[in-house]
Amino acid sequence: MPGVSTGSGLAGGYFEPLSKAKYTSVTTFRRSGQPVATPVHVVTDGDVAYFRTWDVSGKAKRLRHTTAVEVAPSTIRGRVSGPWLRAEARLLAGAESETAARLIARRHPVLHGRLIPWLHRRRGWVTQQYRLDPPTASR
């Protein structure tokens, strides 16, 4: 796909600080407004980024009521190693979800190409892909 950055940092855009990071801290918010940070794998594509989680995770539950998130490059343990960016997370479906899943699996072939889908199926979970967009001007 033209313009796709799977971590090479070749594609510019809003999420360029995340393009080289192996992990990204995604901060979602509880109804009370309390932030909850979780390290995830993210793949960037110009002005959008994608990540995945399973349908019953706390992150997915929080995203159902508040789509505003903050993201930053991080370590596997979530220690932030770069600038924070605000974003809007949107649950994907259909072809867009399949495209995001392929991009994530291409960047992390063993973990996201095989292990995570297998584990999610085995436990009866539904793997969900999310798209991160720059915040809207109204925020």
Image (tube, rainbow, N blue to C red):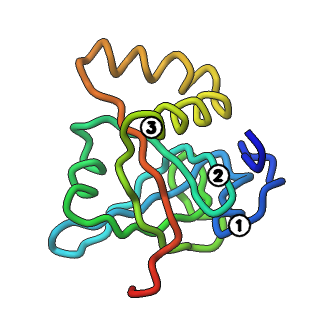
Residue 16 in the image, given as x and y percentages of width and height = 71, 63
Q: How far apart are the two marked residues, 1 and 2, measured between alpha carbons?
A: 9 Å
The residue that label 1 is drawn on is 13
What secondary structure is found at the residue carrying circle 1? loop
Mark 3 = which residue?
97
Task: Give the class, few, some or many, for how many residues have Cα within 10 Å of label 1's Cα (few <14, many ≥20).
Answer: some
Task: Judge from the rendering whether residue 79 lies leftward or rightward of residue 128; answer left or right.
Answer: right
Residues at badges 1 and 3 in contact (C-beta under 8 Å)?
no
Considering only order in the chain, which callout, 3 or 1, is on the residue closer to the N terminus?
1
Q: Which mark is residue 28?
A: none
Label 3 amino acid?
Answer: Ser
Kindly indicate the quadrant of the structure image that contains residue 107.
Answer: top right
Q: Quarter of the image containing the C terminus?
A: bottom left
**N-term mark: 1 or 2:** 1
Relative to the observer, which residue lies in front, 135 or 107? 135
Question: Relative to the observer, which residue lies in front, 24 or 135?
Answer: 135
Give the residue number, with chain letter if any, for mark 2: 44
Residue 76 at what x, y percent from top left? 56, 45
Q: Dots 1 and 2: beta carbons under 8 Å?
A: yes
